Amino acid sequence: MEFDYRKELTKIPHKPGVYQYFDKEGTLIYVGKAKDLKNRVSSYFVNPDQLNSKTRVLVRKINRIAFTIVDTEIDAWLLENSLIKKHQPRYNVMLKDDKTYPWIVIKHERFPRIFWTRKYIKDGSRYYGPYASVGMMHIVLDMVRELFPLRTCNLNLSQENISKGKFKICLEYQIGNCKGPCEGYQSEEDYNQNLSDIKDILNGKITVVTNRLKDQMQEAAGKMDFEGAMKFKLKLDKLANYQSKSTVVSSLITNVDVFSIASEDNYAFVNFLKVVNGVIIQTQTLEMKKRLDETDAELLAIAIPEIRSRFRSHSKEIIVPFELDIEGNEDNRFVVPKMGEKRKLLDLSLKNVAYFKKERLLQYEKLNPEVKTERVLKQMQKDLRLPVLPRHIECFDNSNIQGNFPVSAIVVFRDAKPSKKDYRHFNVKTVEGPNDFATMEEAVFRRYRRLLDEDQPLPQLIVIDGGKGQLGAALKSLRLLGIDKKVTVIGIAKRLEELFYPGDQYPLYLDKKSETLKIIQHLRDEAHRFGITFHRNQRSRKTFVSELDNIPGIGKVTVEKLLKTFKSVKKVKEANDEELKKVLNLKQIQALRQYFTVEDPIEKD
């Protein structure tokens, strides 16, 4: 099957992430990152003449595109690097080893130092990163050092050495960059408190630190120590401008598998992220077809061993979104994280599986419109609390101008789509003056009395364009006909898109983006359009024809000839006698002139 890049591009979002190109054999041949996935991938295909020769060869070999959404461009950079090192795609520039990445390390020692390094040594020290660039890493490190003075020397600050007075304070102490723990000027407890704040910042827990600094600032101000309070204020300002590190990679997460699932009626989608040495090296979303009415937990329990076997994963820790009915053992342990780095990884997996499900269902519904119809109707049934699917919906709307020419219109939707052949309109017969409630009552009564008389099926849902008053009028007619318990009727108020139910004191509000509300709005707008068009036609016909009908000696047949010949009453009035003789005799012409001579002064008053 020939690769259709246009179809593939429709699935890709305008979000940051990583894209992967595969050839016909299913081999990964290129990995790239993008701030905007759709724009970047499109650039390979939209203007091929602008590509260099090597890239054109790459594009000709592409047979499948996969992508992974991330939160930031930095996350995309990190994920791209890890996938390239893992799979070494043919068309990617080979990257150096992990040791070339810059890290921030908190050394495992008494009065720990904090500095940056490219060497990851497992000696009990804490490593943060890797960072996307040395420049970014230095910005973080400089900010931390400005906020919290720490030592930079490599002295062995053991309790014994400090007690013996082996060290002297240096220039760093004099200029305020260190508090002098080497001579006992700073306690280990105070030093570790600063270190705790630094760890929170590097872990992205900015709120914890800012709240602590606010408390300290207020405490200092309460003691009239305004200089100290100002120092805390400056620290808060620096933190306000600081962006926390990437959430994709954490050196604390060594070797885990991450799984998440999203399902609908017949299909389920499982996302898998494999993390090794703190880096995502594998990402995949798979589709499962339901055989029975399996739960998400049952499907995930089936998918996990299959996926782990397929990708030859032996990670002992498996992150999942909810508890599974599977007992862990020494070879694997299931974890449902609530916060921290592992929770962020799970959230990333959930984001990807949700997007994959959405795009796959949209593609499937384009090929099978009946599937979308069923889904939309089921959603409407759920949102509107209906006893059955609303396959047949009718909506009423009234039109009049100051009580003149009142008309009512009804539009019909079948399977959530307009059925224009079933549209109807009513000339109101029993209502005089501007009475919208009485107009609605007459229209609803006439509509459903006829359906009952002709033994036609009733709709499952009736929508009334209006608030509680119009809804009450419609319900009155339904009760008279004895069908108020056989159909669901709701009213929609224009101002706030409120949905009213009979007997409910408070309206129902649907999400502004929900498909249910959009269909109800479409019904309302279509009823208004159809009604106002009919109303204008009626108003024009009755206004102009009745004016000529009032002329003595000119009958309806002659009036129709005049309008057909001159097109409007205005042109009839402006025509000369010779032109009028084509339609009227001399006596009729005299009557017409006399009529308009009498009428004109009144019009000018």
Image (cartoon, helix red, strand yellow):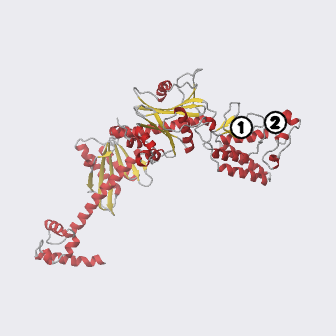
Which amino acid lies under the numbered mark 1 shown in the image of this protein? Answer: Ile
Q: Earlier in the sequence, mark 2 or mark 1?
A: 1
Residue 201, image quadrant:
top right
Confirm or deny contact between disc 2 and disc 1 (CB under 8 A).
no
Residue 578, image quadrant:
bottom left
The residue tagged with tag 1: helix, strand or loop? strand
Which amino acid lies under the numbered mark 2 shown in the image of this protein? Answer: Leu
**Residue 460 point in image, percent of width and height:** 33, 41
Residue 7, image quadrant:
top left
Q: Is residue 351 above or below residue 229?
A: above
In the image, taking residue 341 as reference, residue 272 lies left or right, namely left
The residue tagged with tag 2: helix, strand or loop? loop
Q: Is residue 7 above or below residue 294?
A: below
**Residue 358 point in image, percent of width and height:** 43, 39
Comparing 355 with 297, the one in front is 355
Residue assigned mark 2: 157
Q: Residue furthest front?
A: 53
**Residue 141 point in image, percent of width and height:** 69, 44
Comparing 258 with 540, the one in front is 258
Picture quarter with the N terminus: top left
In the image, taking residue 376 as reference, residue 335 lies left or right, namely right
Residue assigned mark 1: 106
Q: Is residue 601 above or below residue 235?
A: below
